[in-house]
Structures are given as C-alpha cells and as structure tokens.
C-alpha cells in the first residue's frame, strides 16, 4: 500500500464527516505507523484518533497474521471509540478474502464499490 501523493487535508475532511469508519490494519501497516517519519504513521494515527473521539461507528478489518502486541496497541488507541466489531481476515485464504471484499462493499454503502480481485482490490466512487 502506498500513501504517497495522498491529499491529507481532503482525507482528514472526509474522515471527519464520515458516519462510519472502516479501518484496515495489518502488522506491516502498524509497524510503519510506529515510525513518525512514515506517511503511514500520519494516516493510521489520524484514523485512530478520529475513531477514539467516539463520534462515528468503527469497524476494524484485521489482516492475519497479526501480532498480539500490535492488536493490543490498536485496541488501546481506540479507547473511547464506538467500536462495533473486529473482523479478522486470513490473507492466505482466497475465500476469506472474497468474503472480506463483499463485507467491505456493504459497509461502505451505496456509491462506493470495490473492483478487482480480492487480493488486488481498488475503490471506485460512483
């Protein structure tokens, strides 16, 4: 995943006005988040900070394998949030990934759809 070239001001604005936050976490993403000079640090930290405000419903999609320490870190950062569920997805199981794509499509609601295969998906705004 590459976040270079992302307009963070627009991203922040969109996250703030969202009714539901769907946050994808994985060990590599969380490890990158721990480095303050990483663009992933800014992106995931902002999502988790916004979620912790408790204004939006929060769904976590966790890609396995996920270390207990990283999972606990995210859960600690979400204290005060309106966390609805954590969905664990096995990235090596094609059926699991397909179900996750279908579930994310439902969570994102009308006007957003996922394209591509489960292993290489992208978001299309209508």
Image: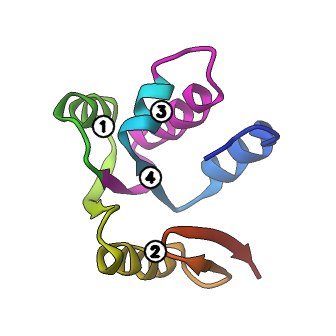
Badge nearest the viewer, 4 or 2: 4
Name the residue: 35% across, 80% down.
Answer: 99
Sequence-earlier tag: 2 or 1: 1
Sequence-earlier tag: 1 or 4: 4
Q: State the mark number for residue 107.
A: 2
Q: Are marks 1 and 3 in contact (CB under 8 Å)?
A: no
Q: Quadrant of residue 80?
A: top left
Distance, label 2 to label 1, CA atoms, is 21 Å
Mark 3 residue crowding within 10 angstroms, few (<14) / some (14–19) / many (20+): some
- Assign the C terminus to one quadrant of the image: bottom right
Sequence-earlier tag: 2 or 3: 3
Q: State the mark number for residue 80.
A: 1
Q: State the mark number for residue 49.
A: 3
Badge nearest the viewer, 2 or 3: 2
Distance, label 1 to label 3, CA atoms, is 10 Å
* Residue identifier under label 4: 24
The magenta stretch is 34-63
Name the residue: 55% across, 26% down.
Answer: 41
What element does badge 4 sit on?
Answer: strand
Name the residue: 22% across, 36% down.
Answer: 67
Q: Position of residue 69 (x, y in %)?
A: 21, 27
Residue reaching furthest to the top:
36
């Amino acid at each position: 995943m590459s976040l270079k070239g992302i307009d963070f001001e627009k991203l922040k604005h969109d996250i703030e006005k969202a009714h539901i936050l769907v946050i994808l976490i994985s060990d590599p993403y969380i490890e990158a988040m721990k480095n303050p000079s990483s663009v992933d640090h800014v992106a995931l930290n902002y999502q988790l900070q916004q979620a912790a405000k408790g204004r939006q419903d929060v769904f976590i999609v966790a890609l396995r394998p996920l270390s207990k320490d990283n999972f606990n870190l995210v859960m600690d950062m979400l204290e005060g949030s309106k966390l609805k569920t954590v969905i664990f997805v096995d990235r090596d199981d094609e059926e699991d990934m397909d179900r996750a794509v279908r579930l994310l499509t439902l969570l994102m609601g009308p006007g957003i759809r996922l394209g591509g295969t489960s292993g290489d998906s992208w978001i299309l705004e209508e």
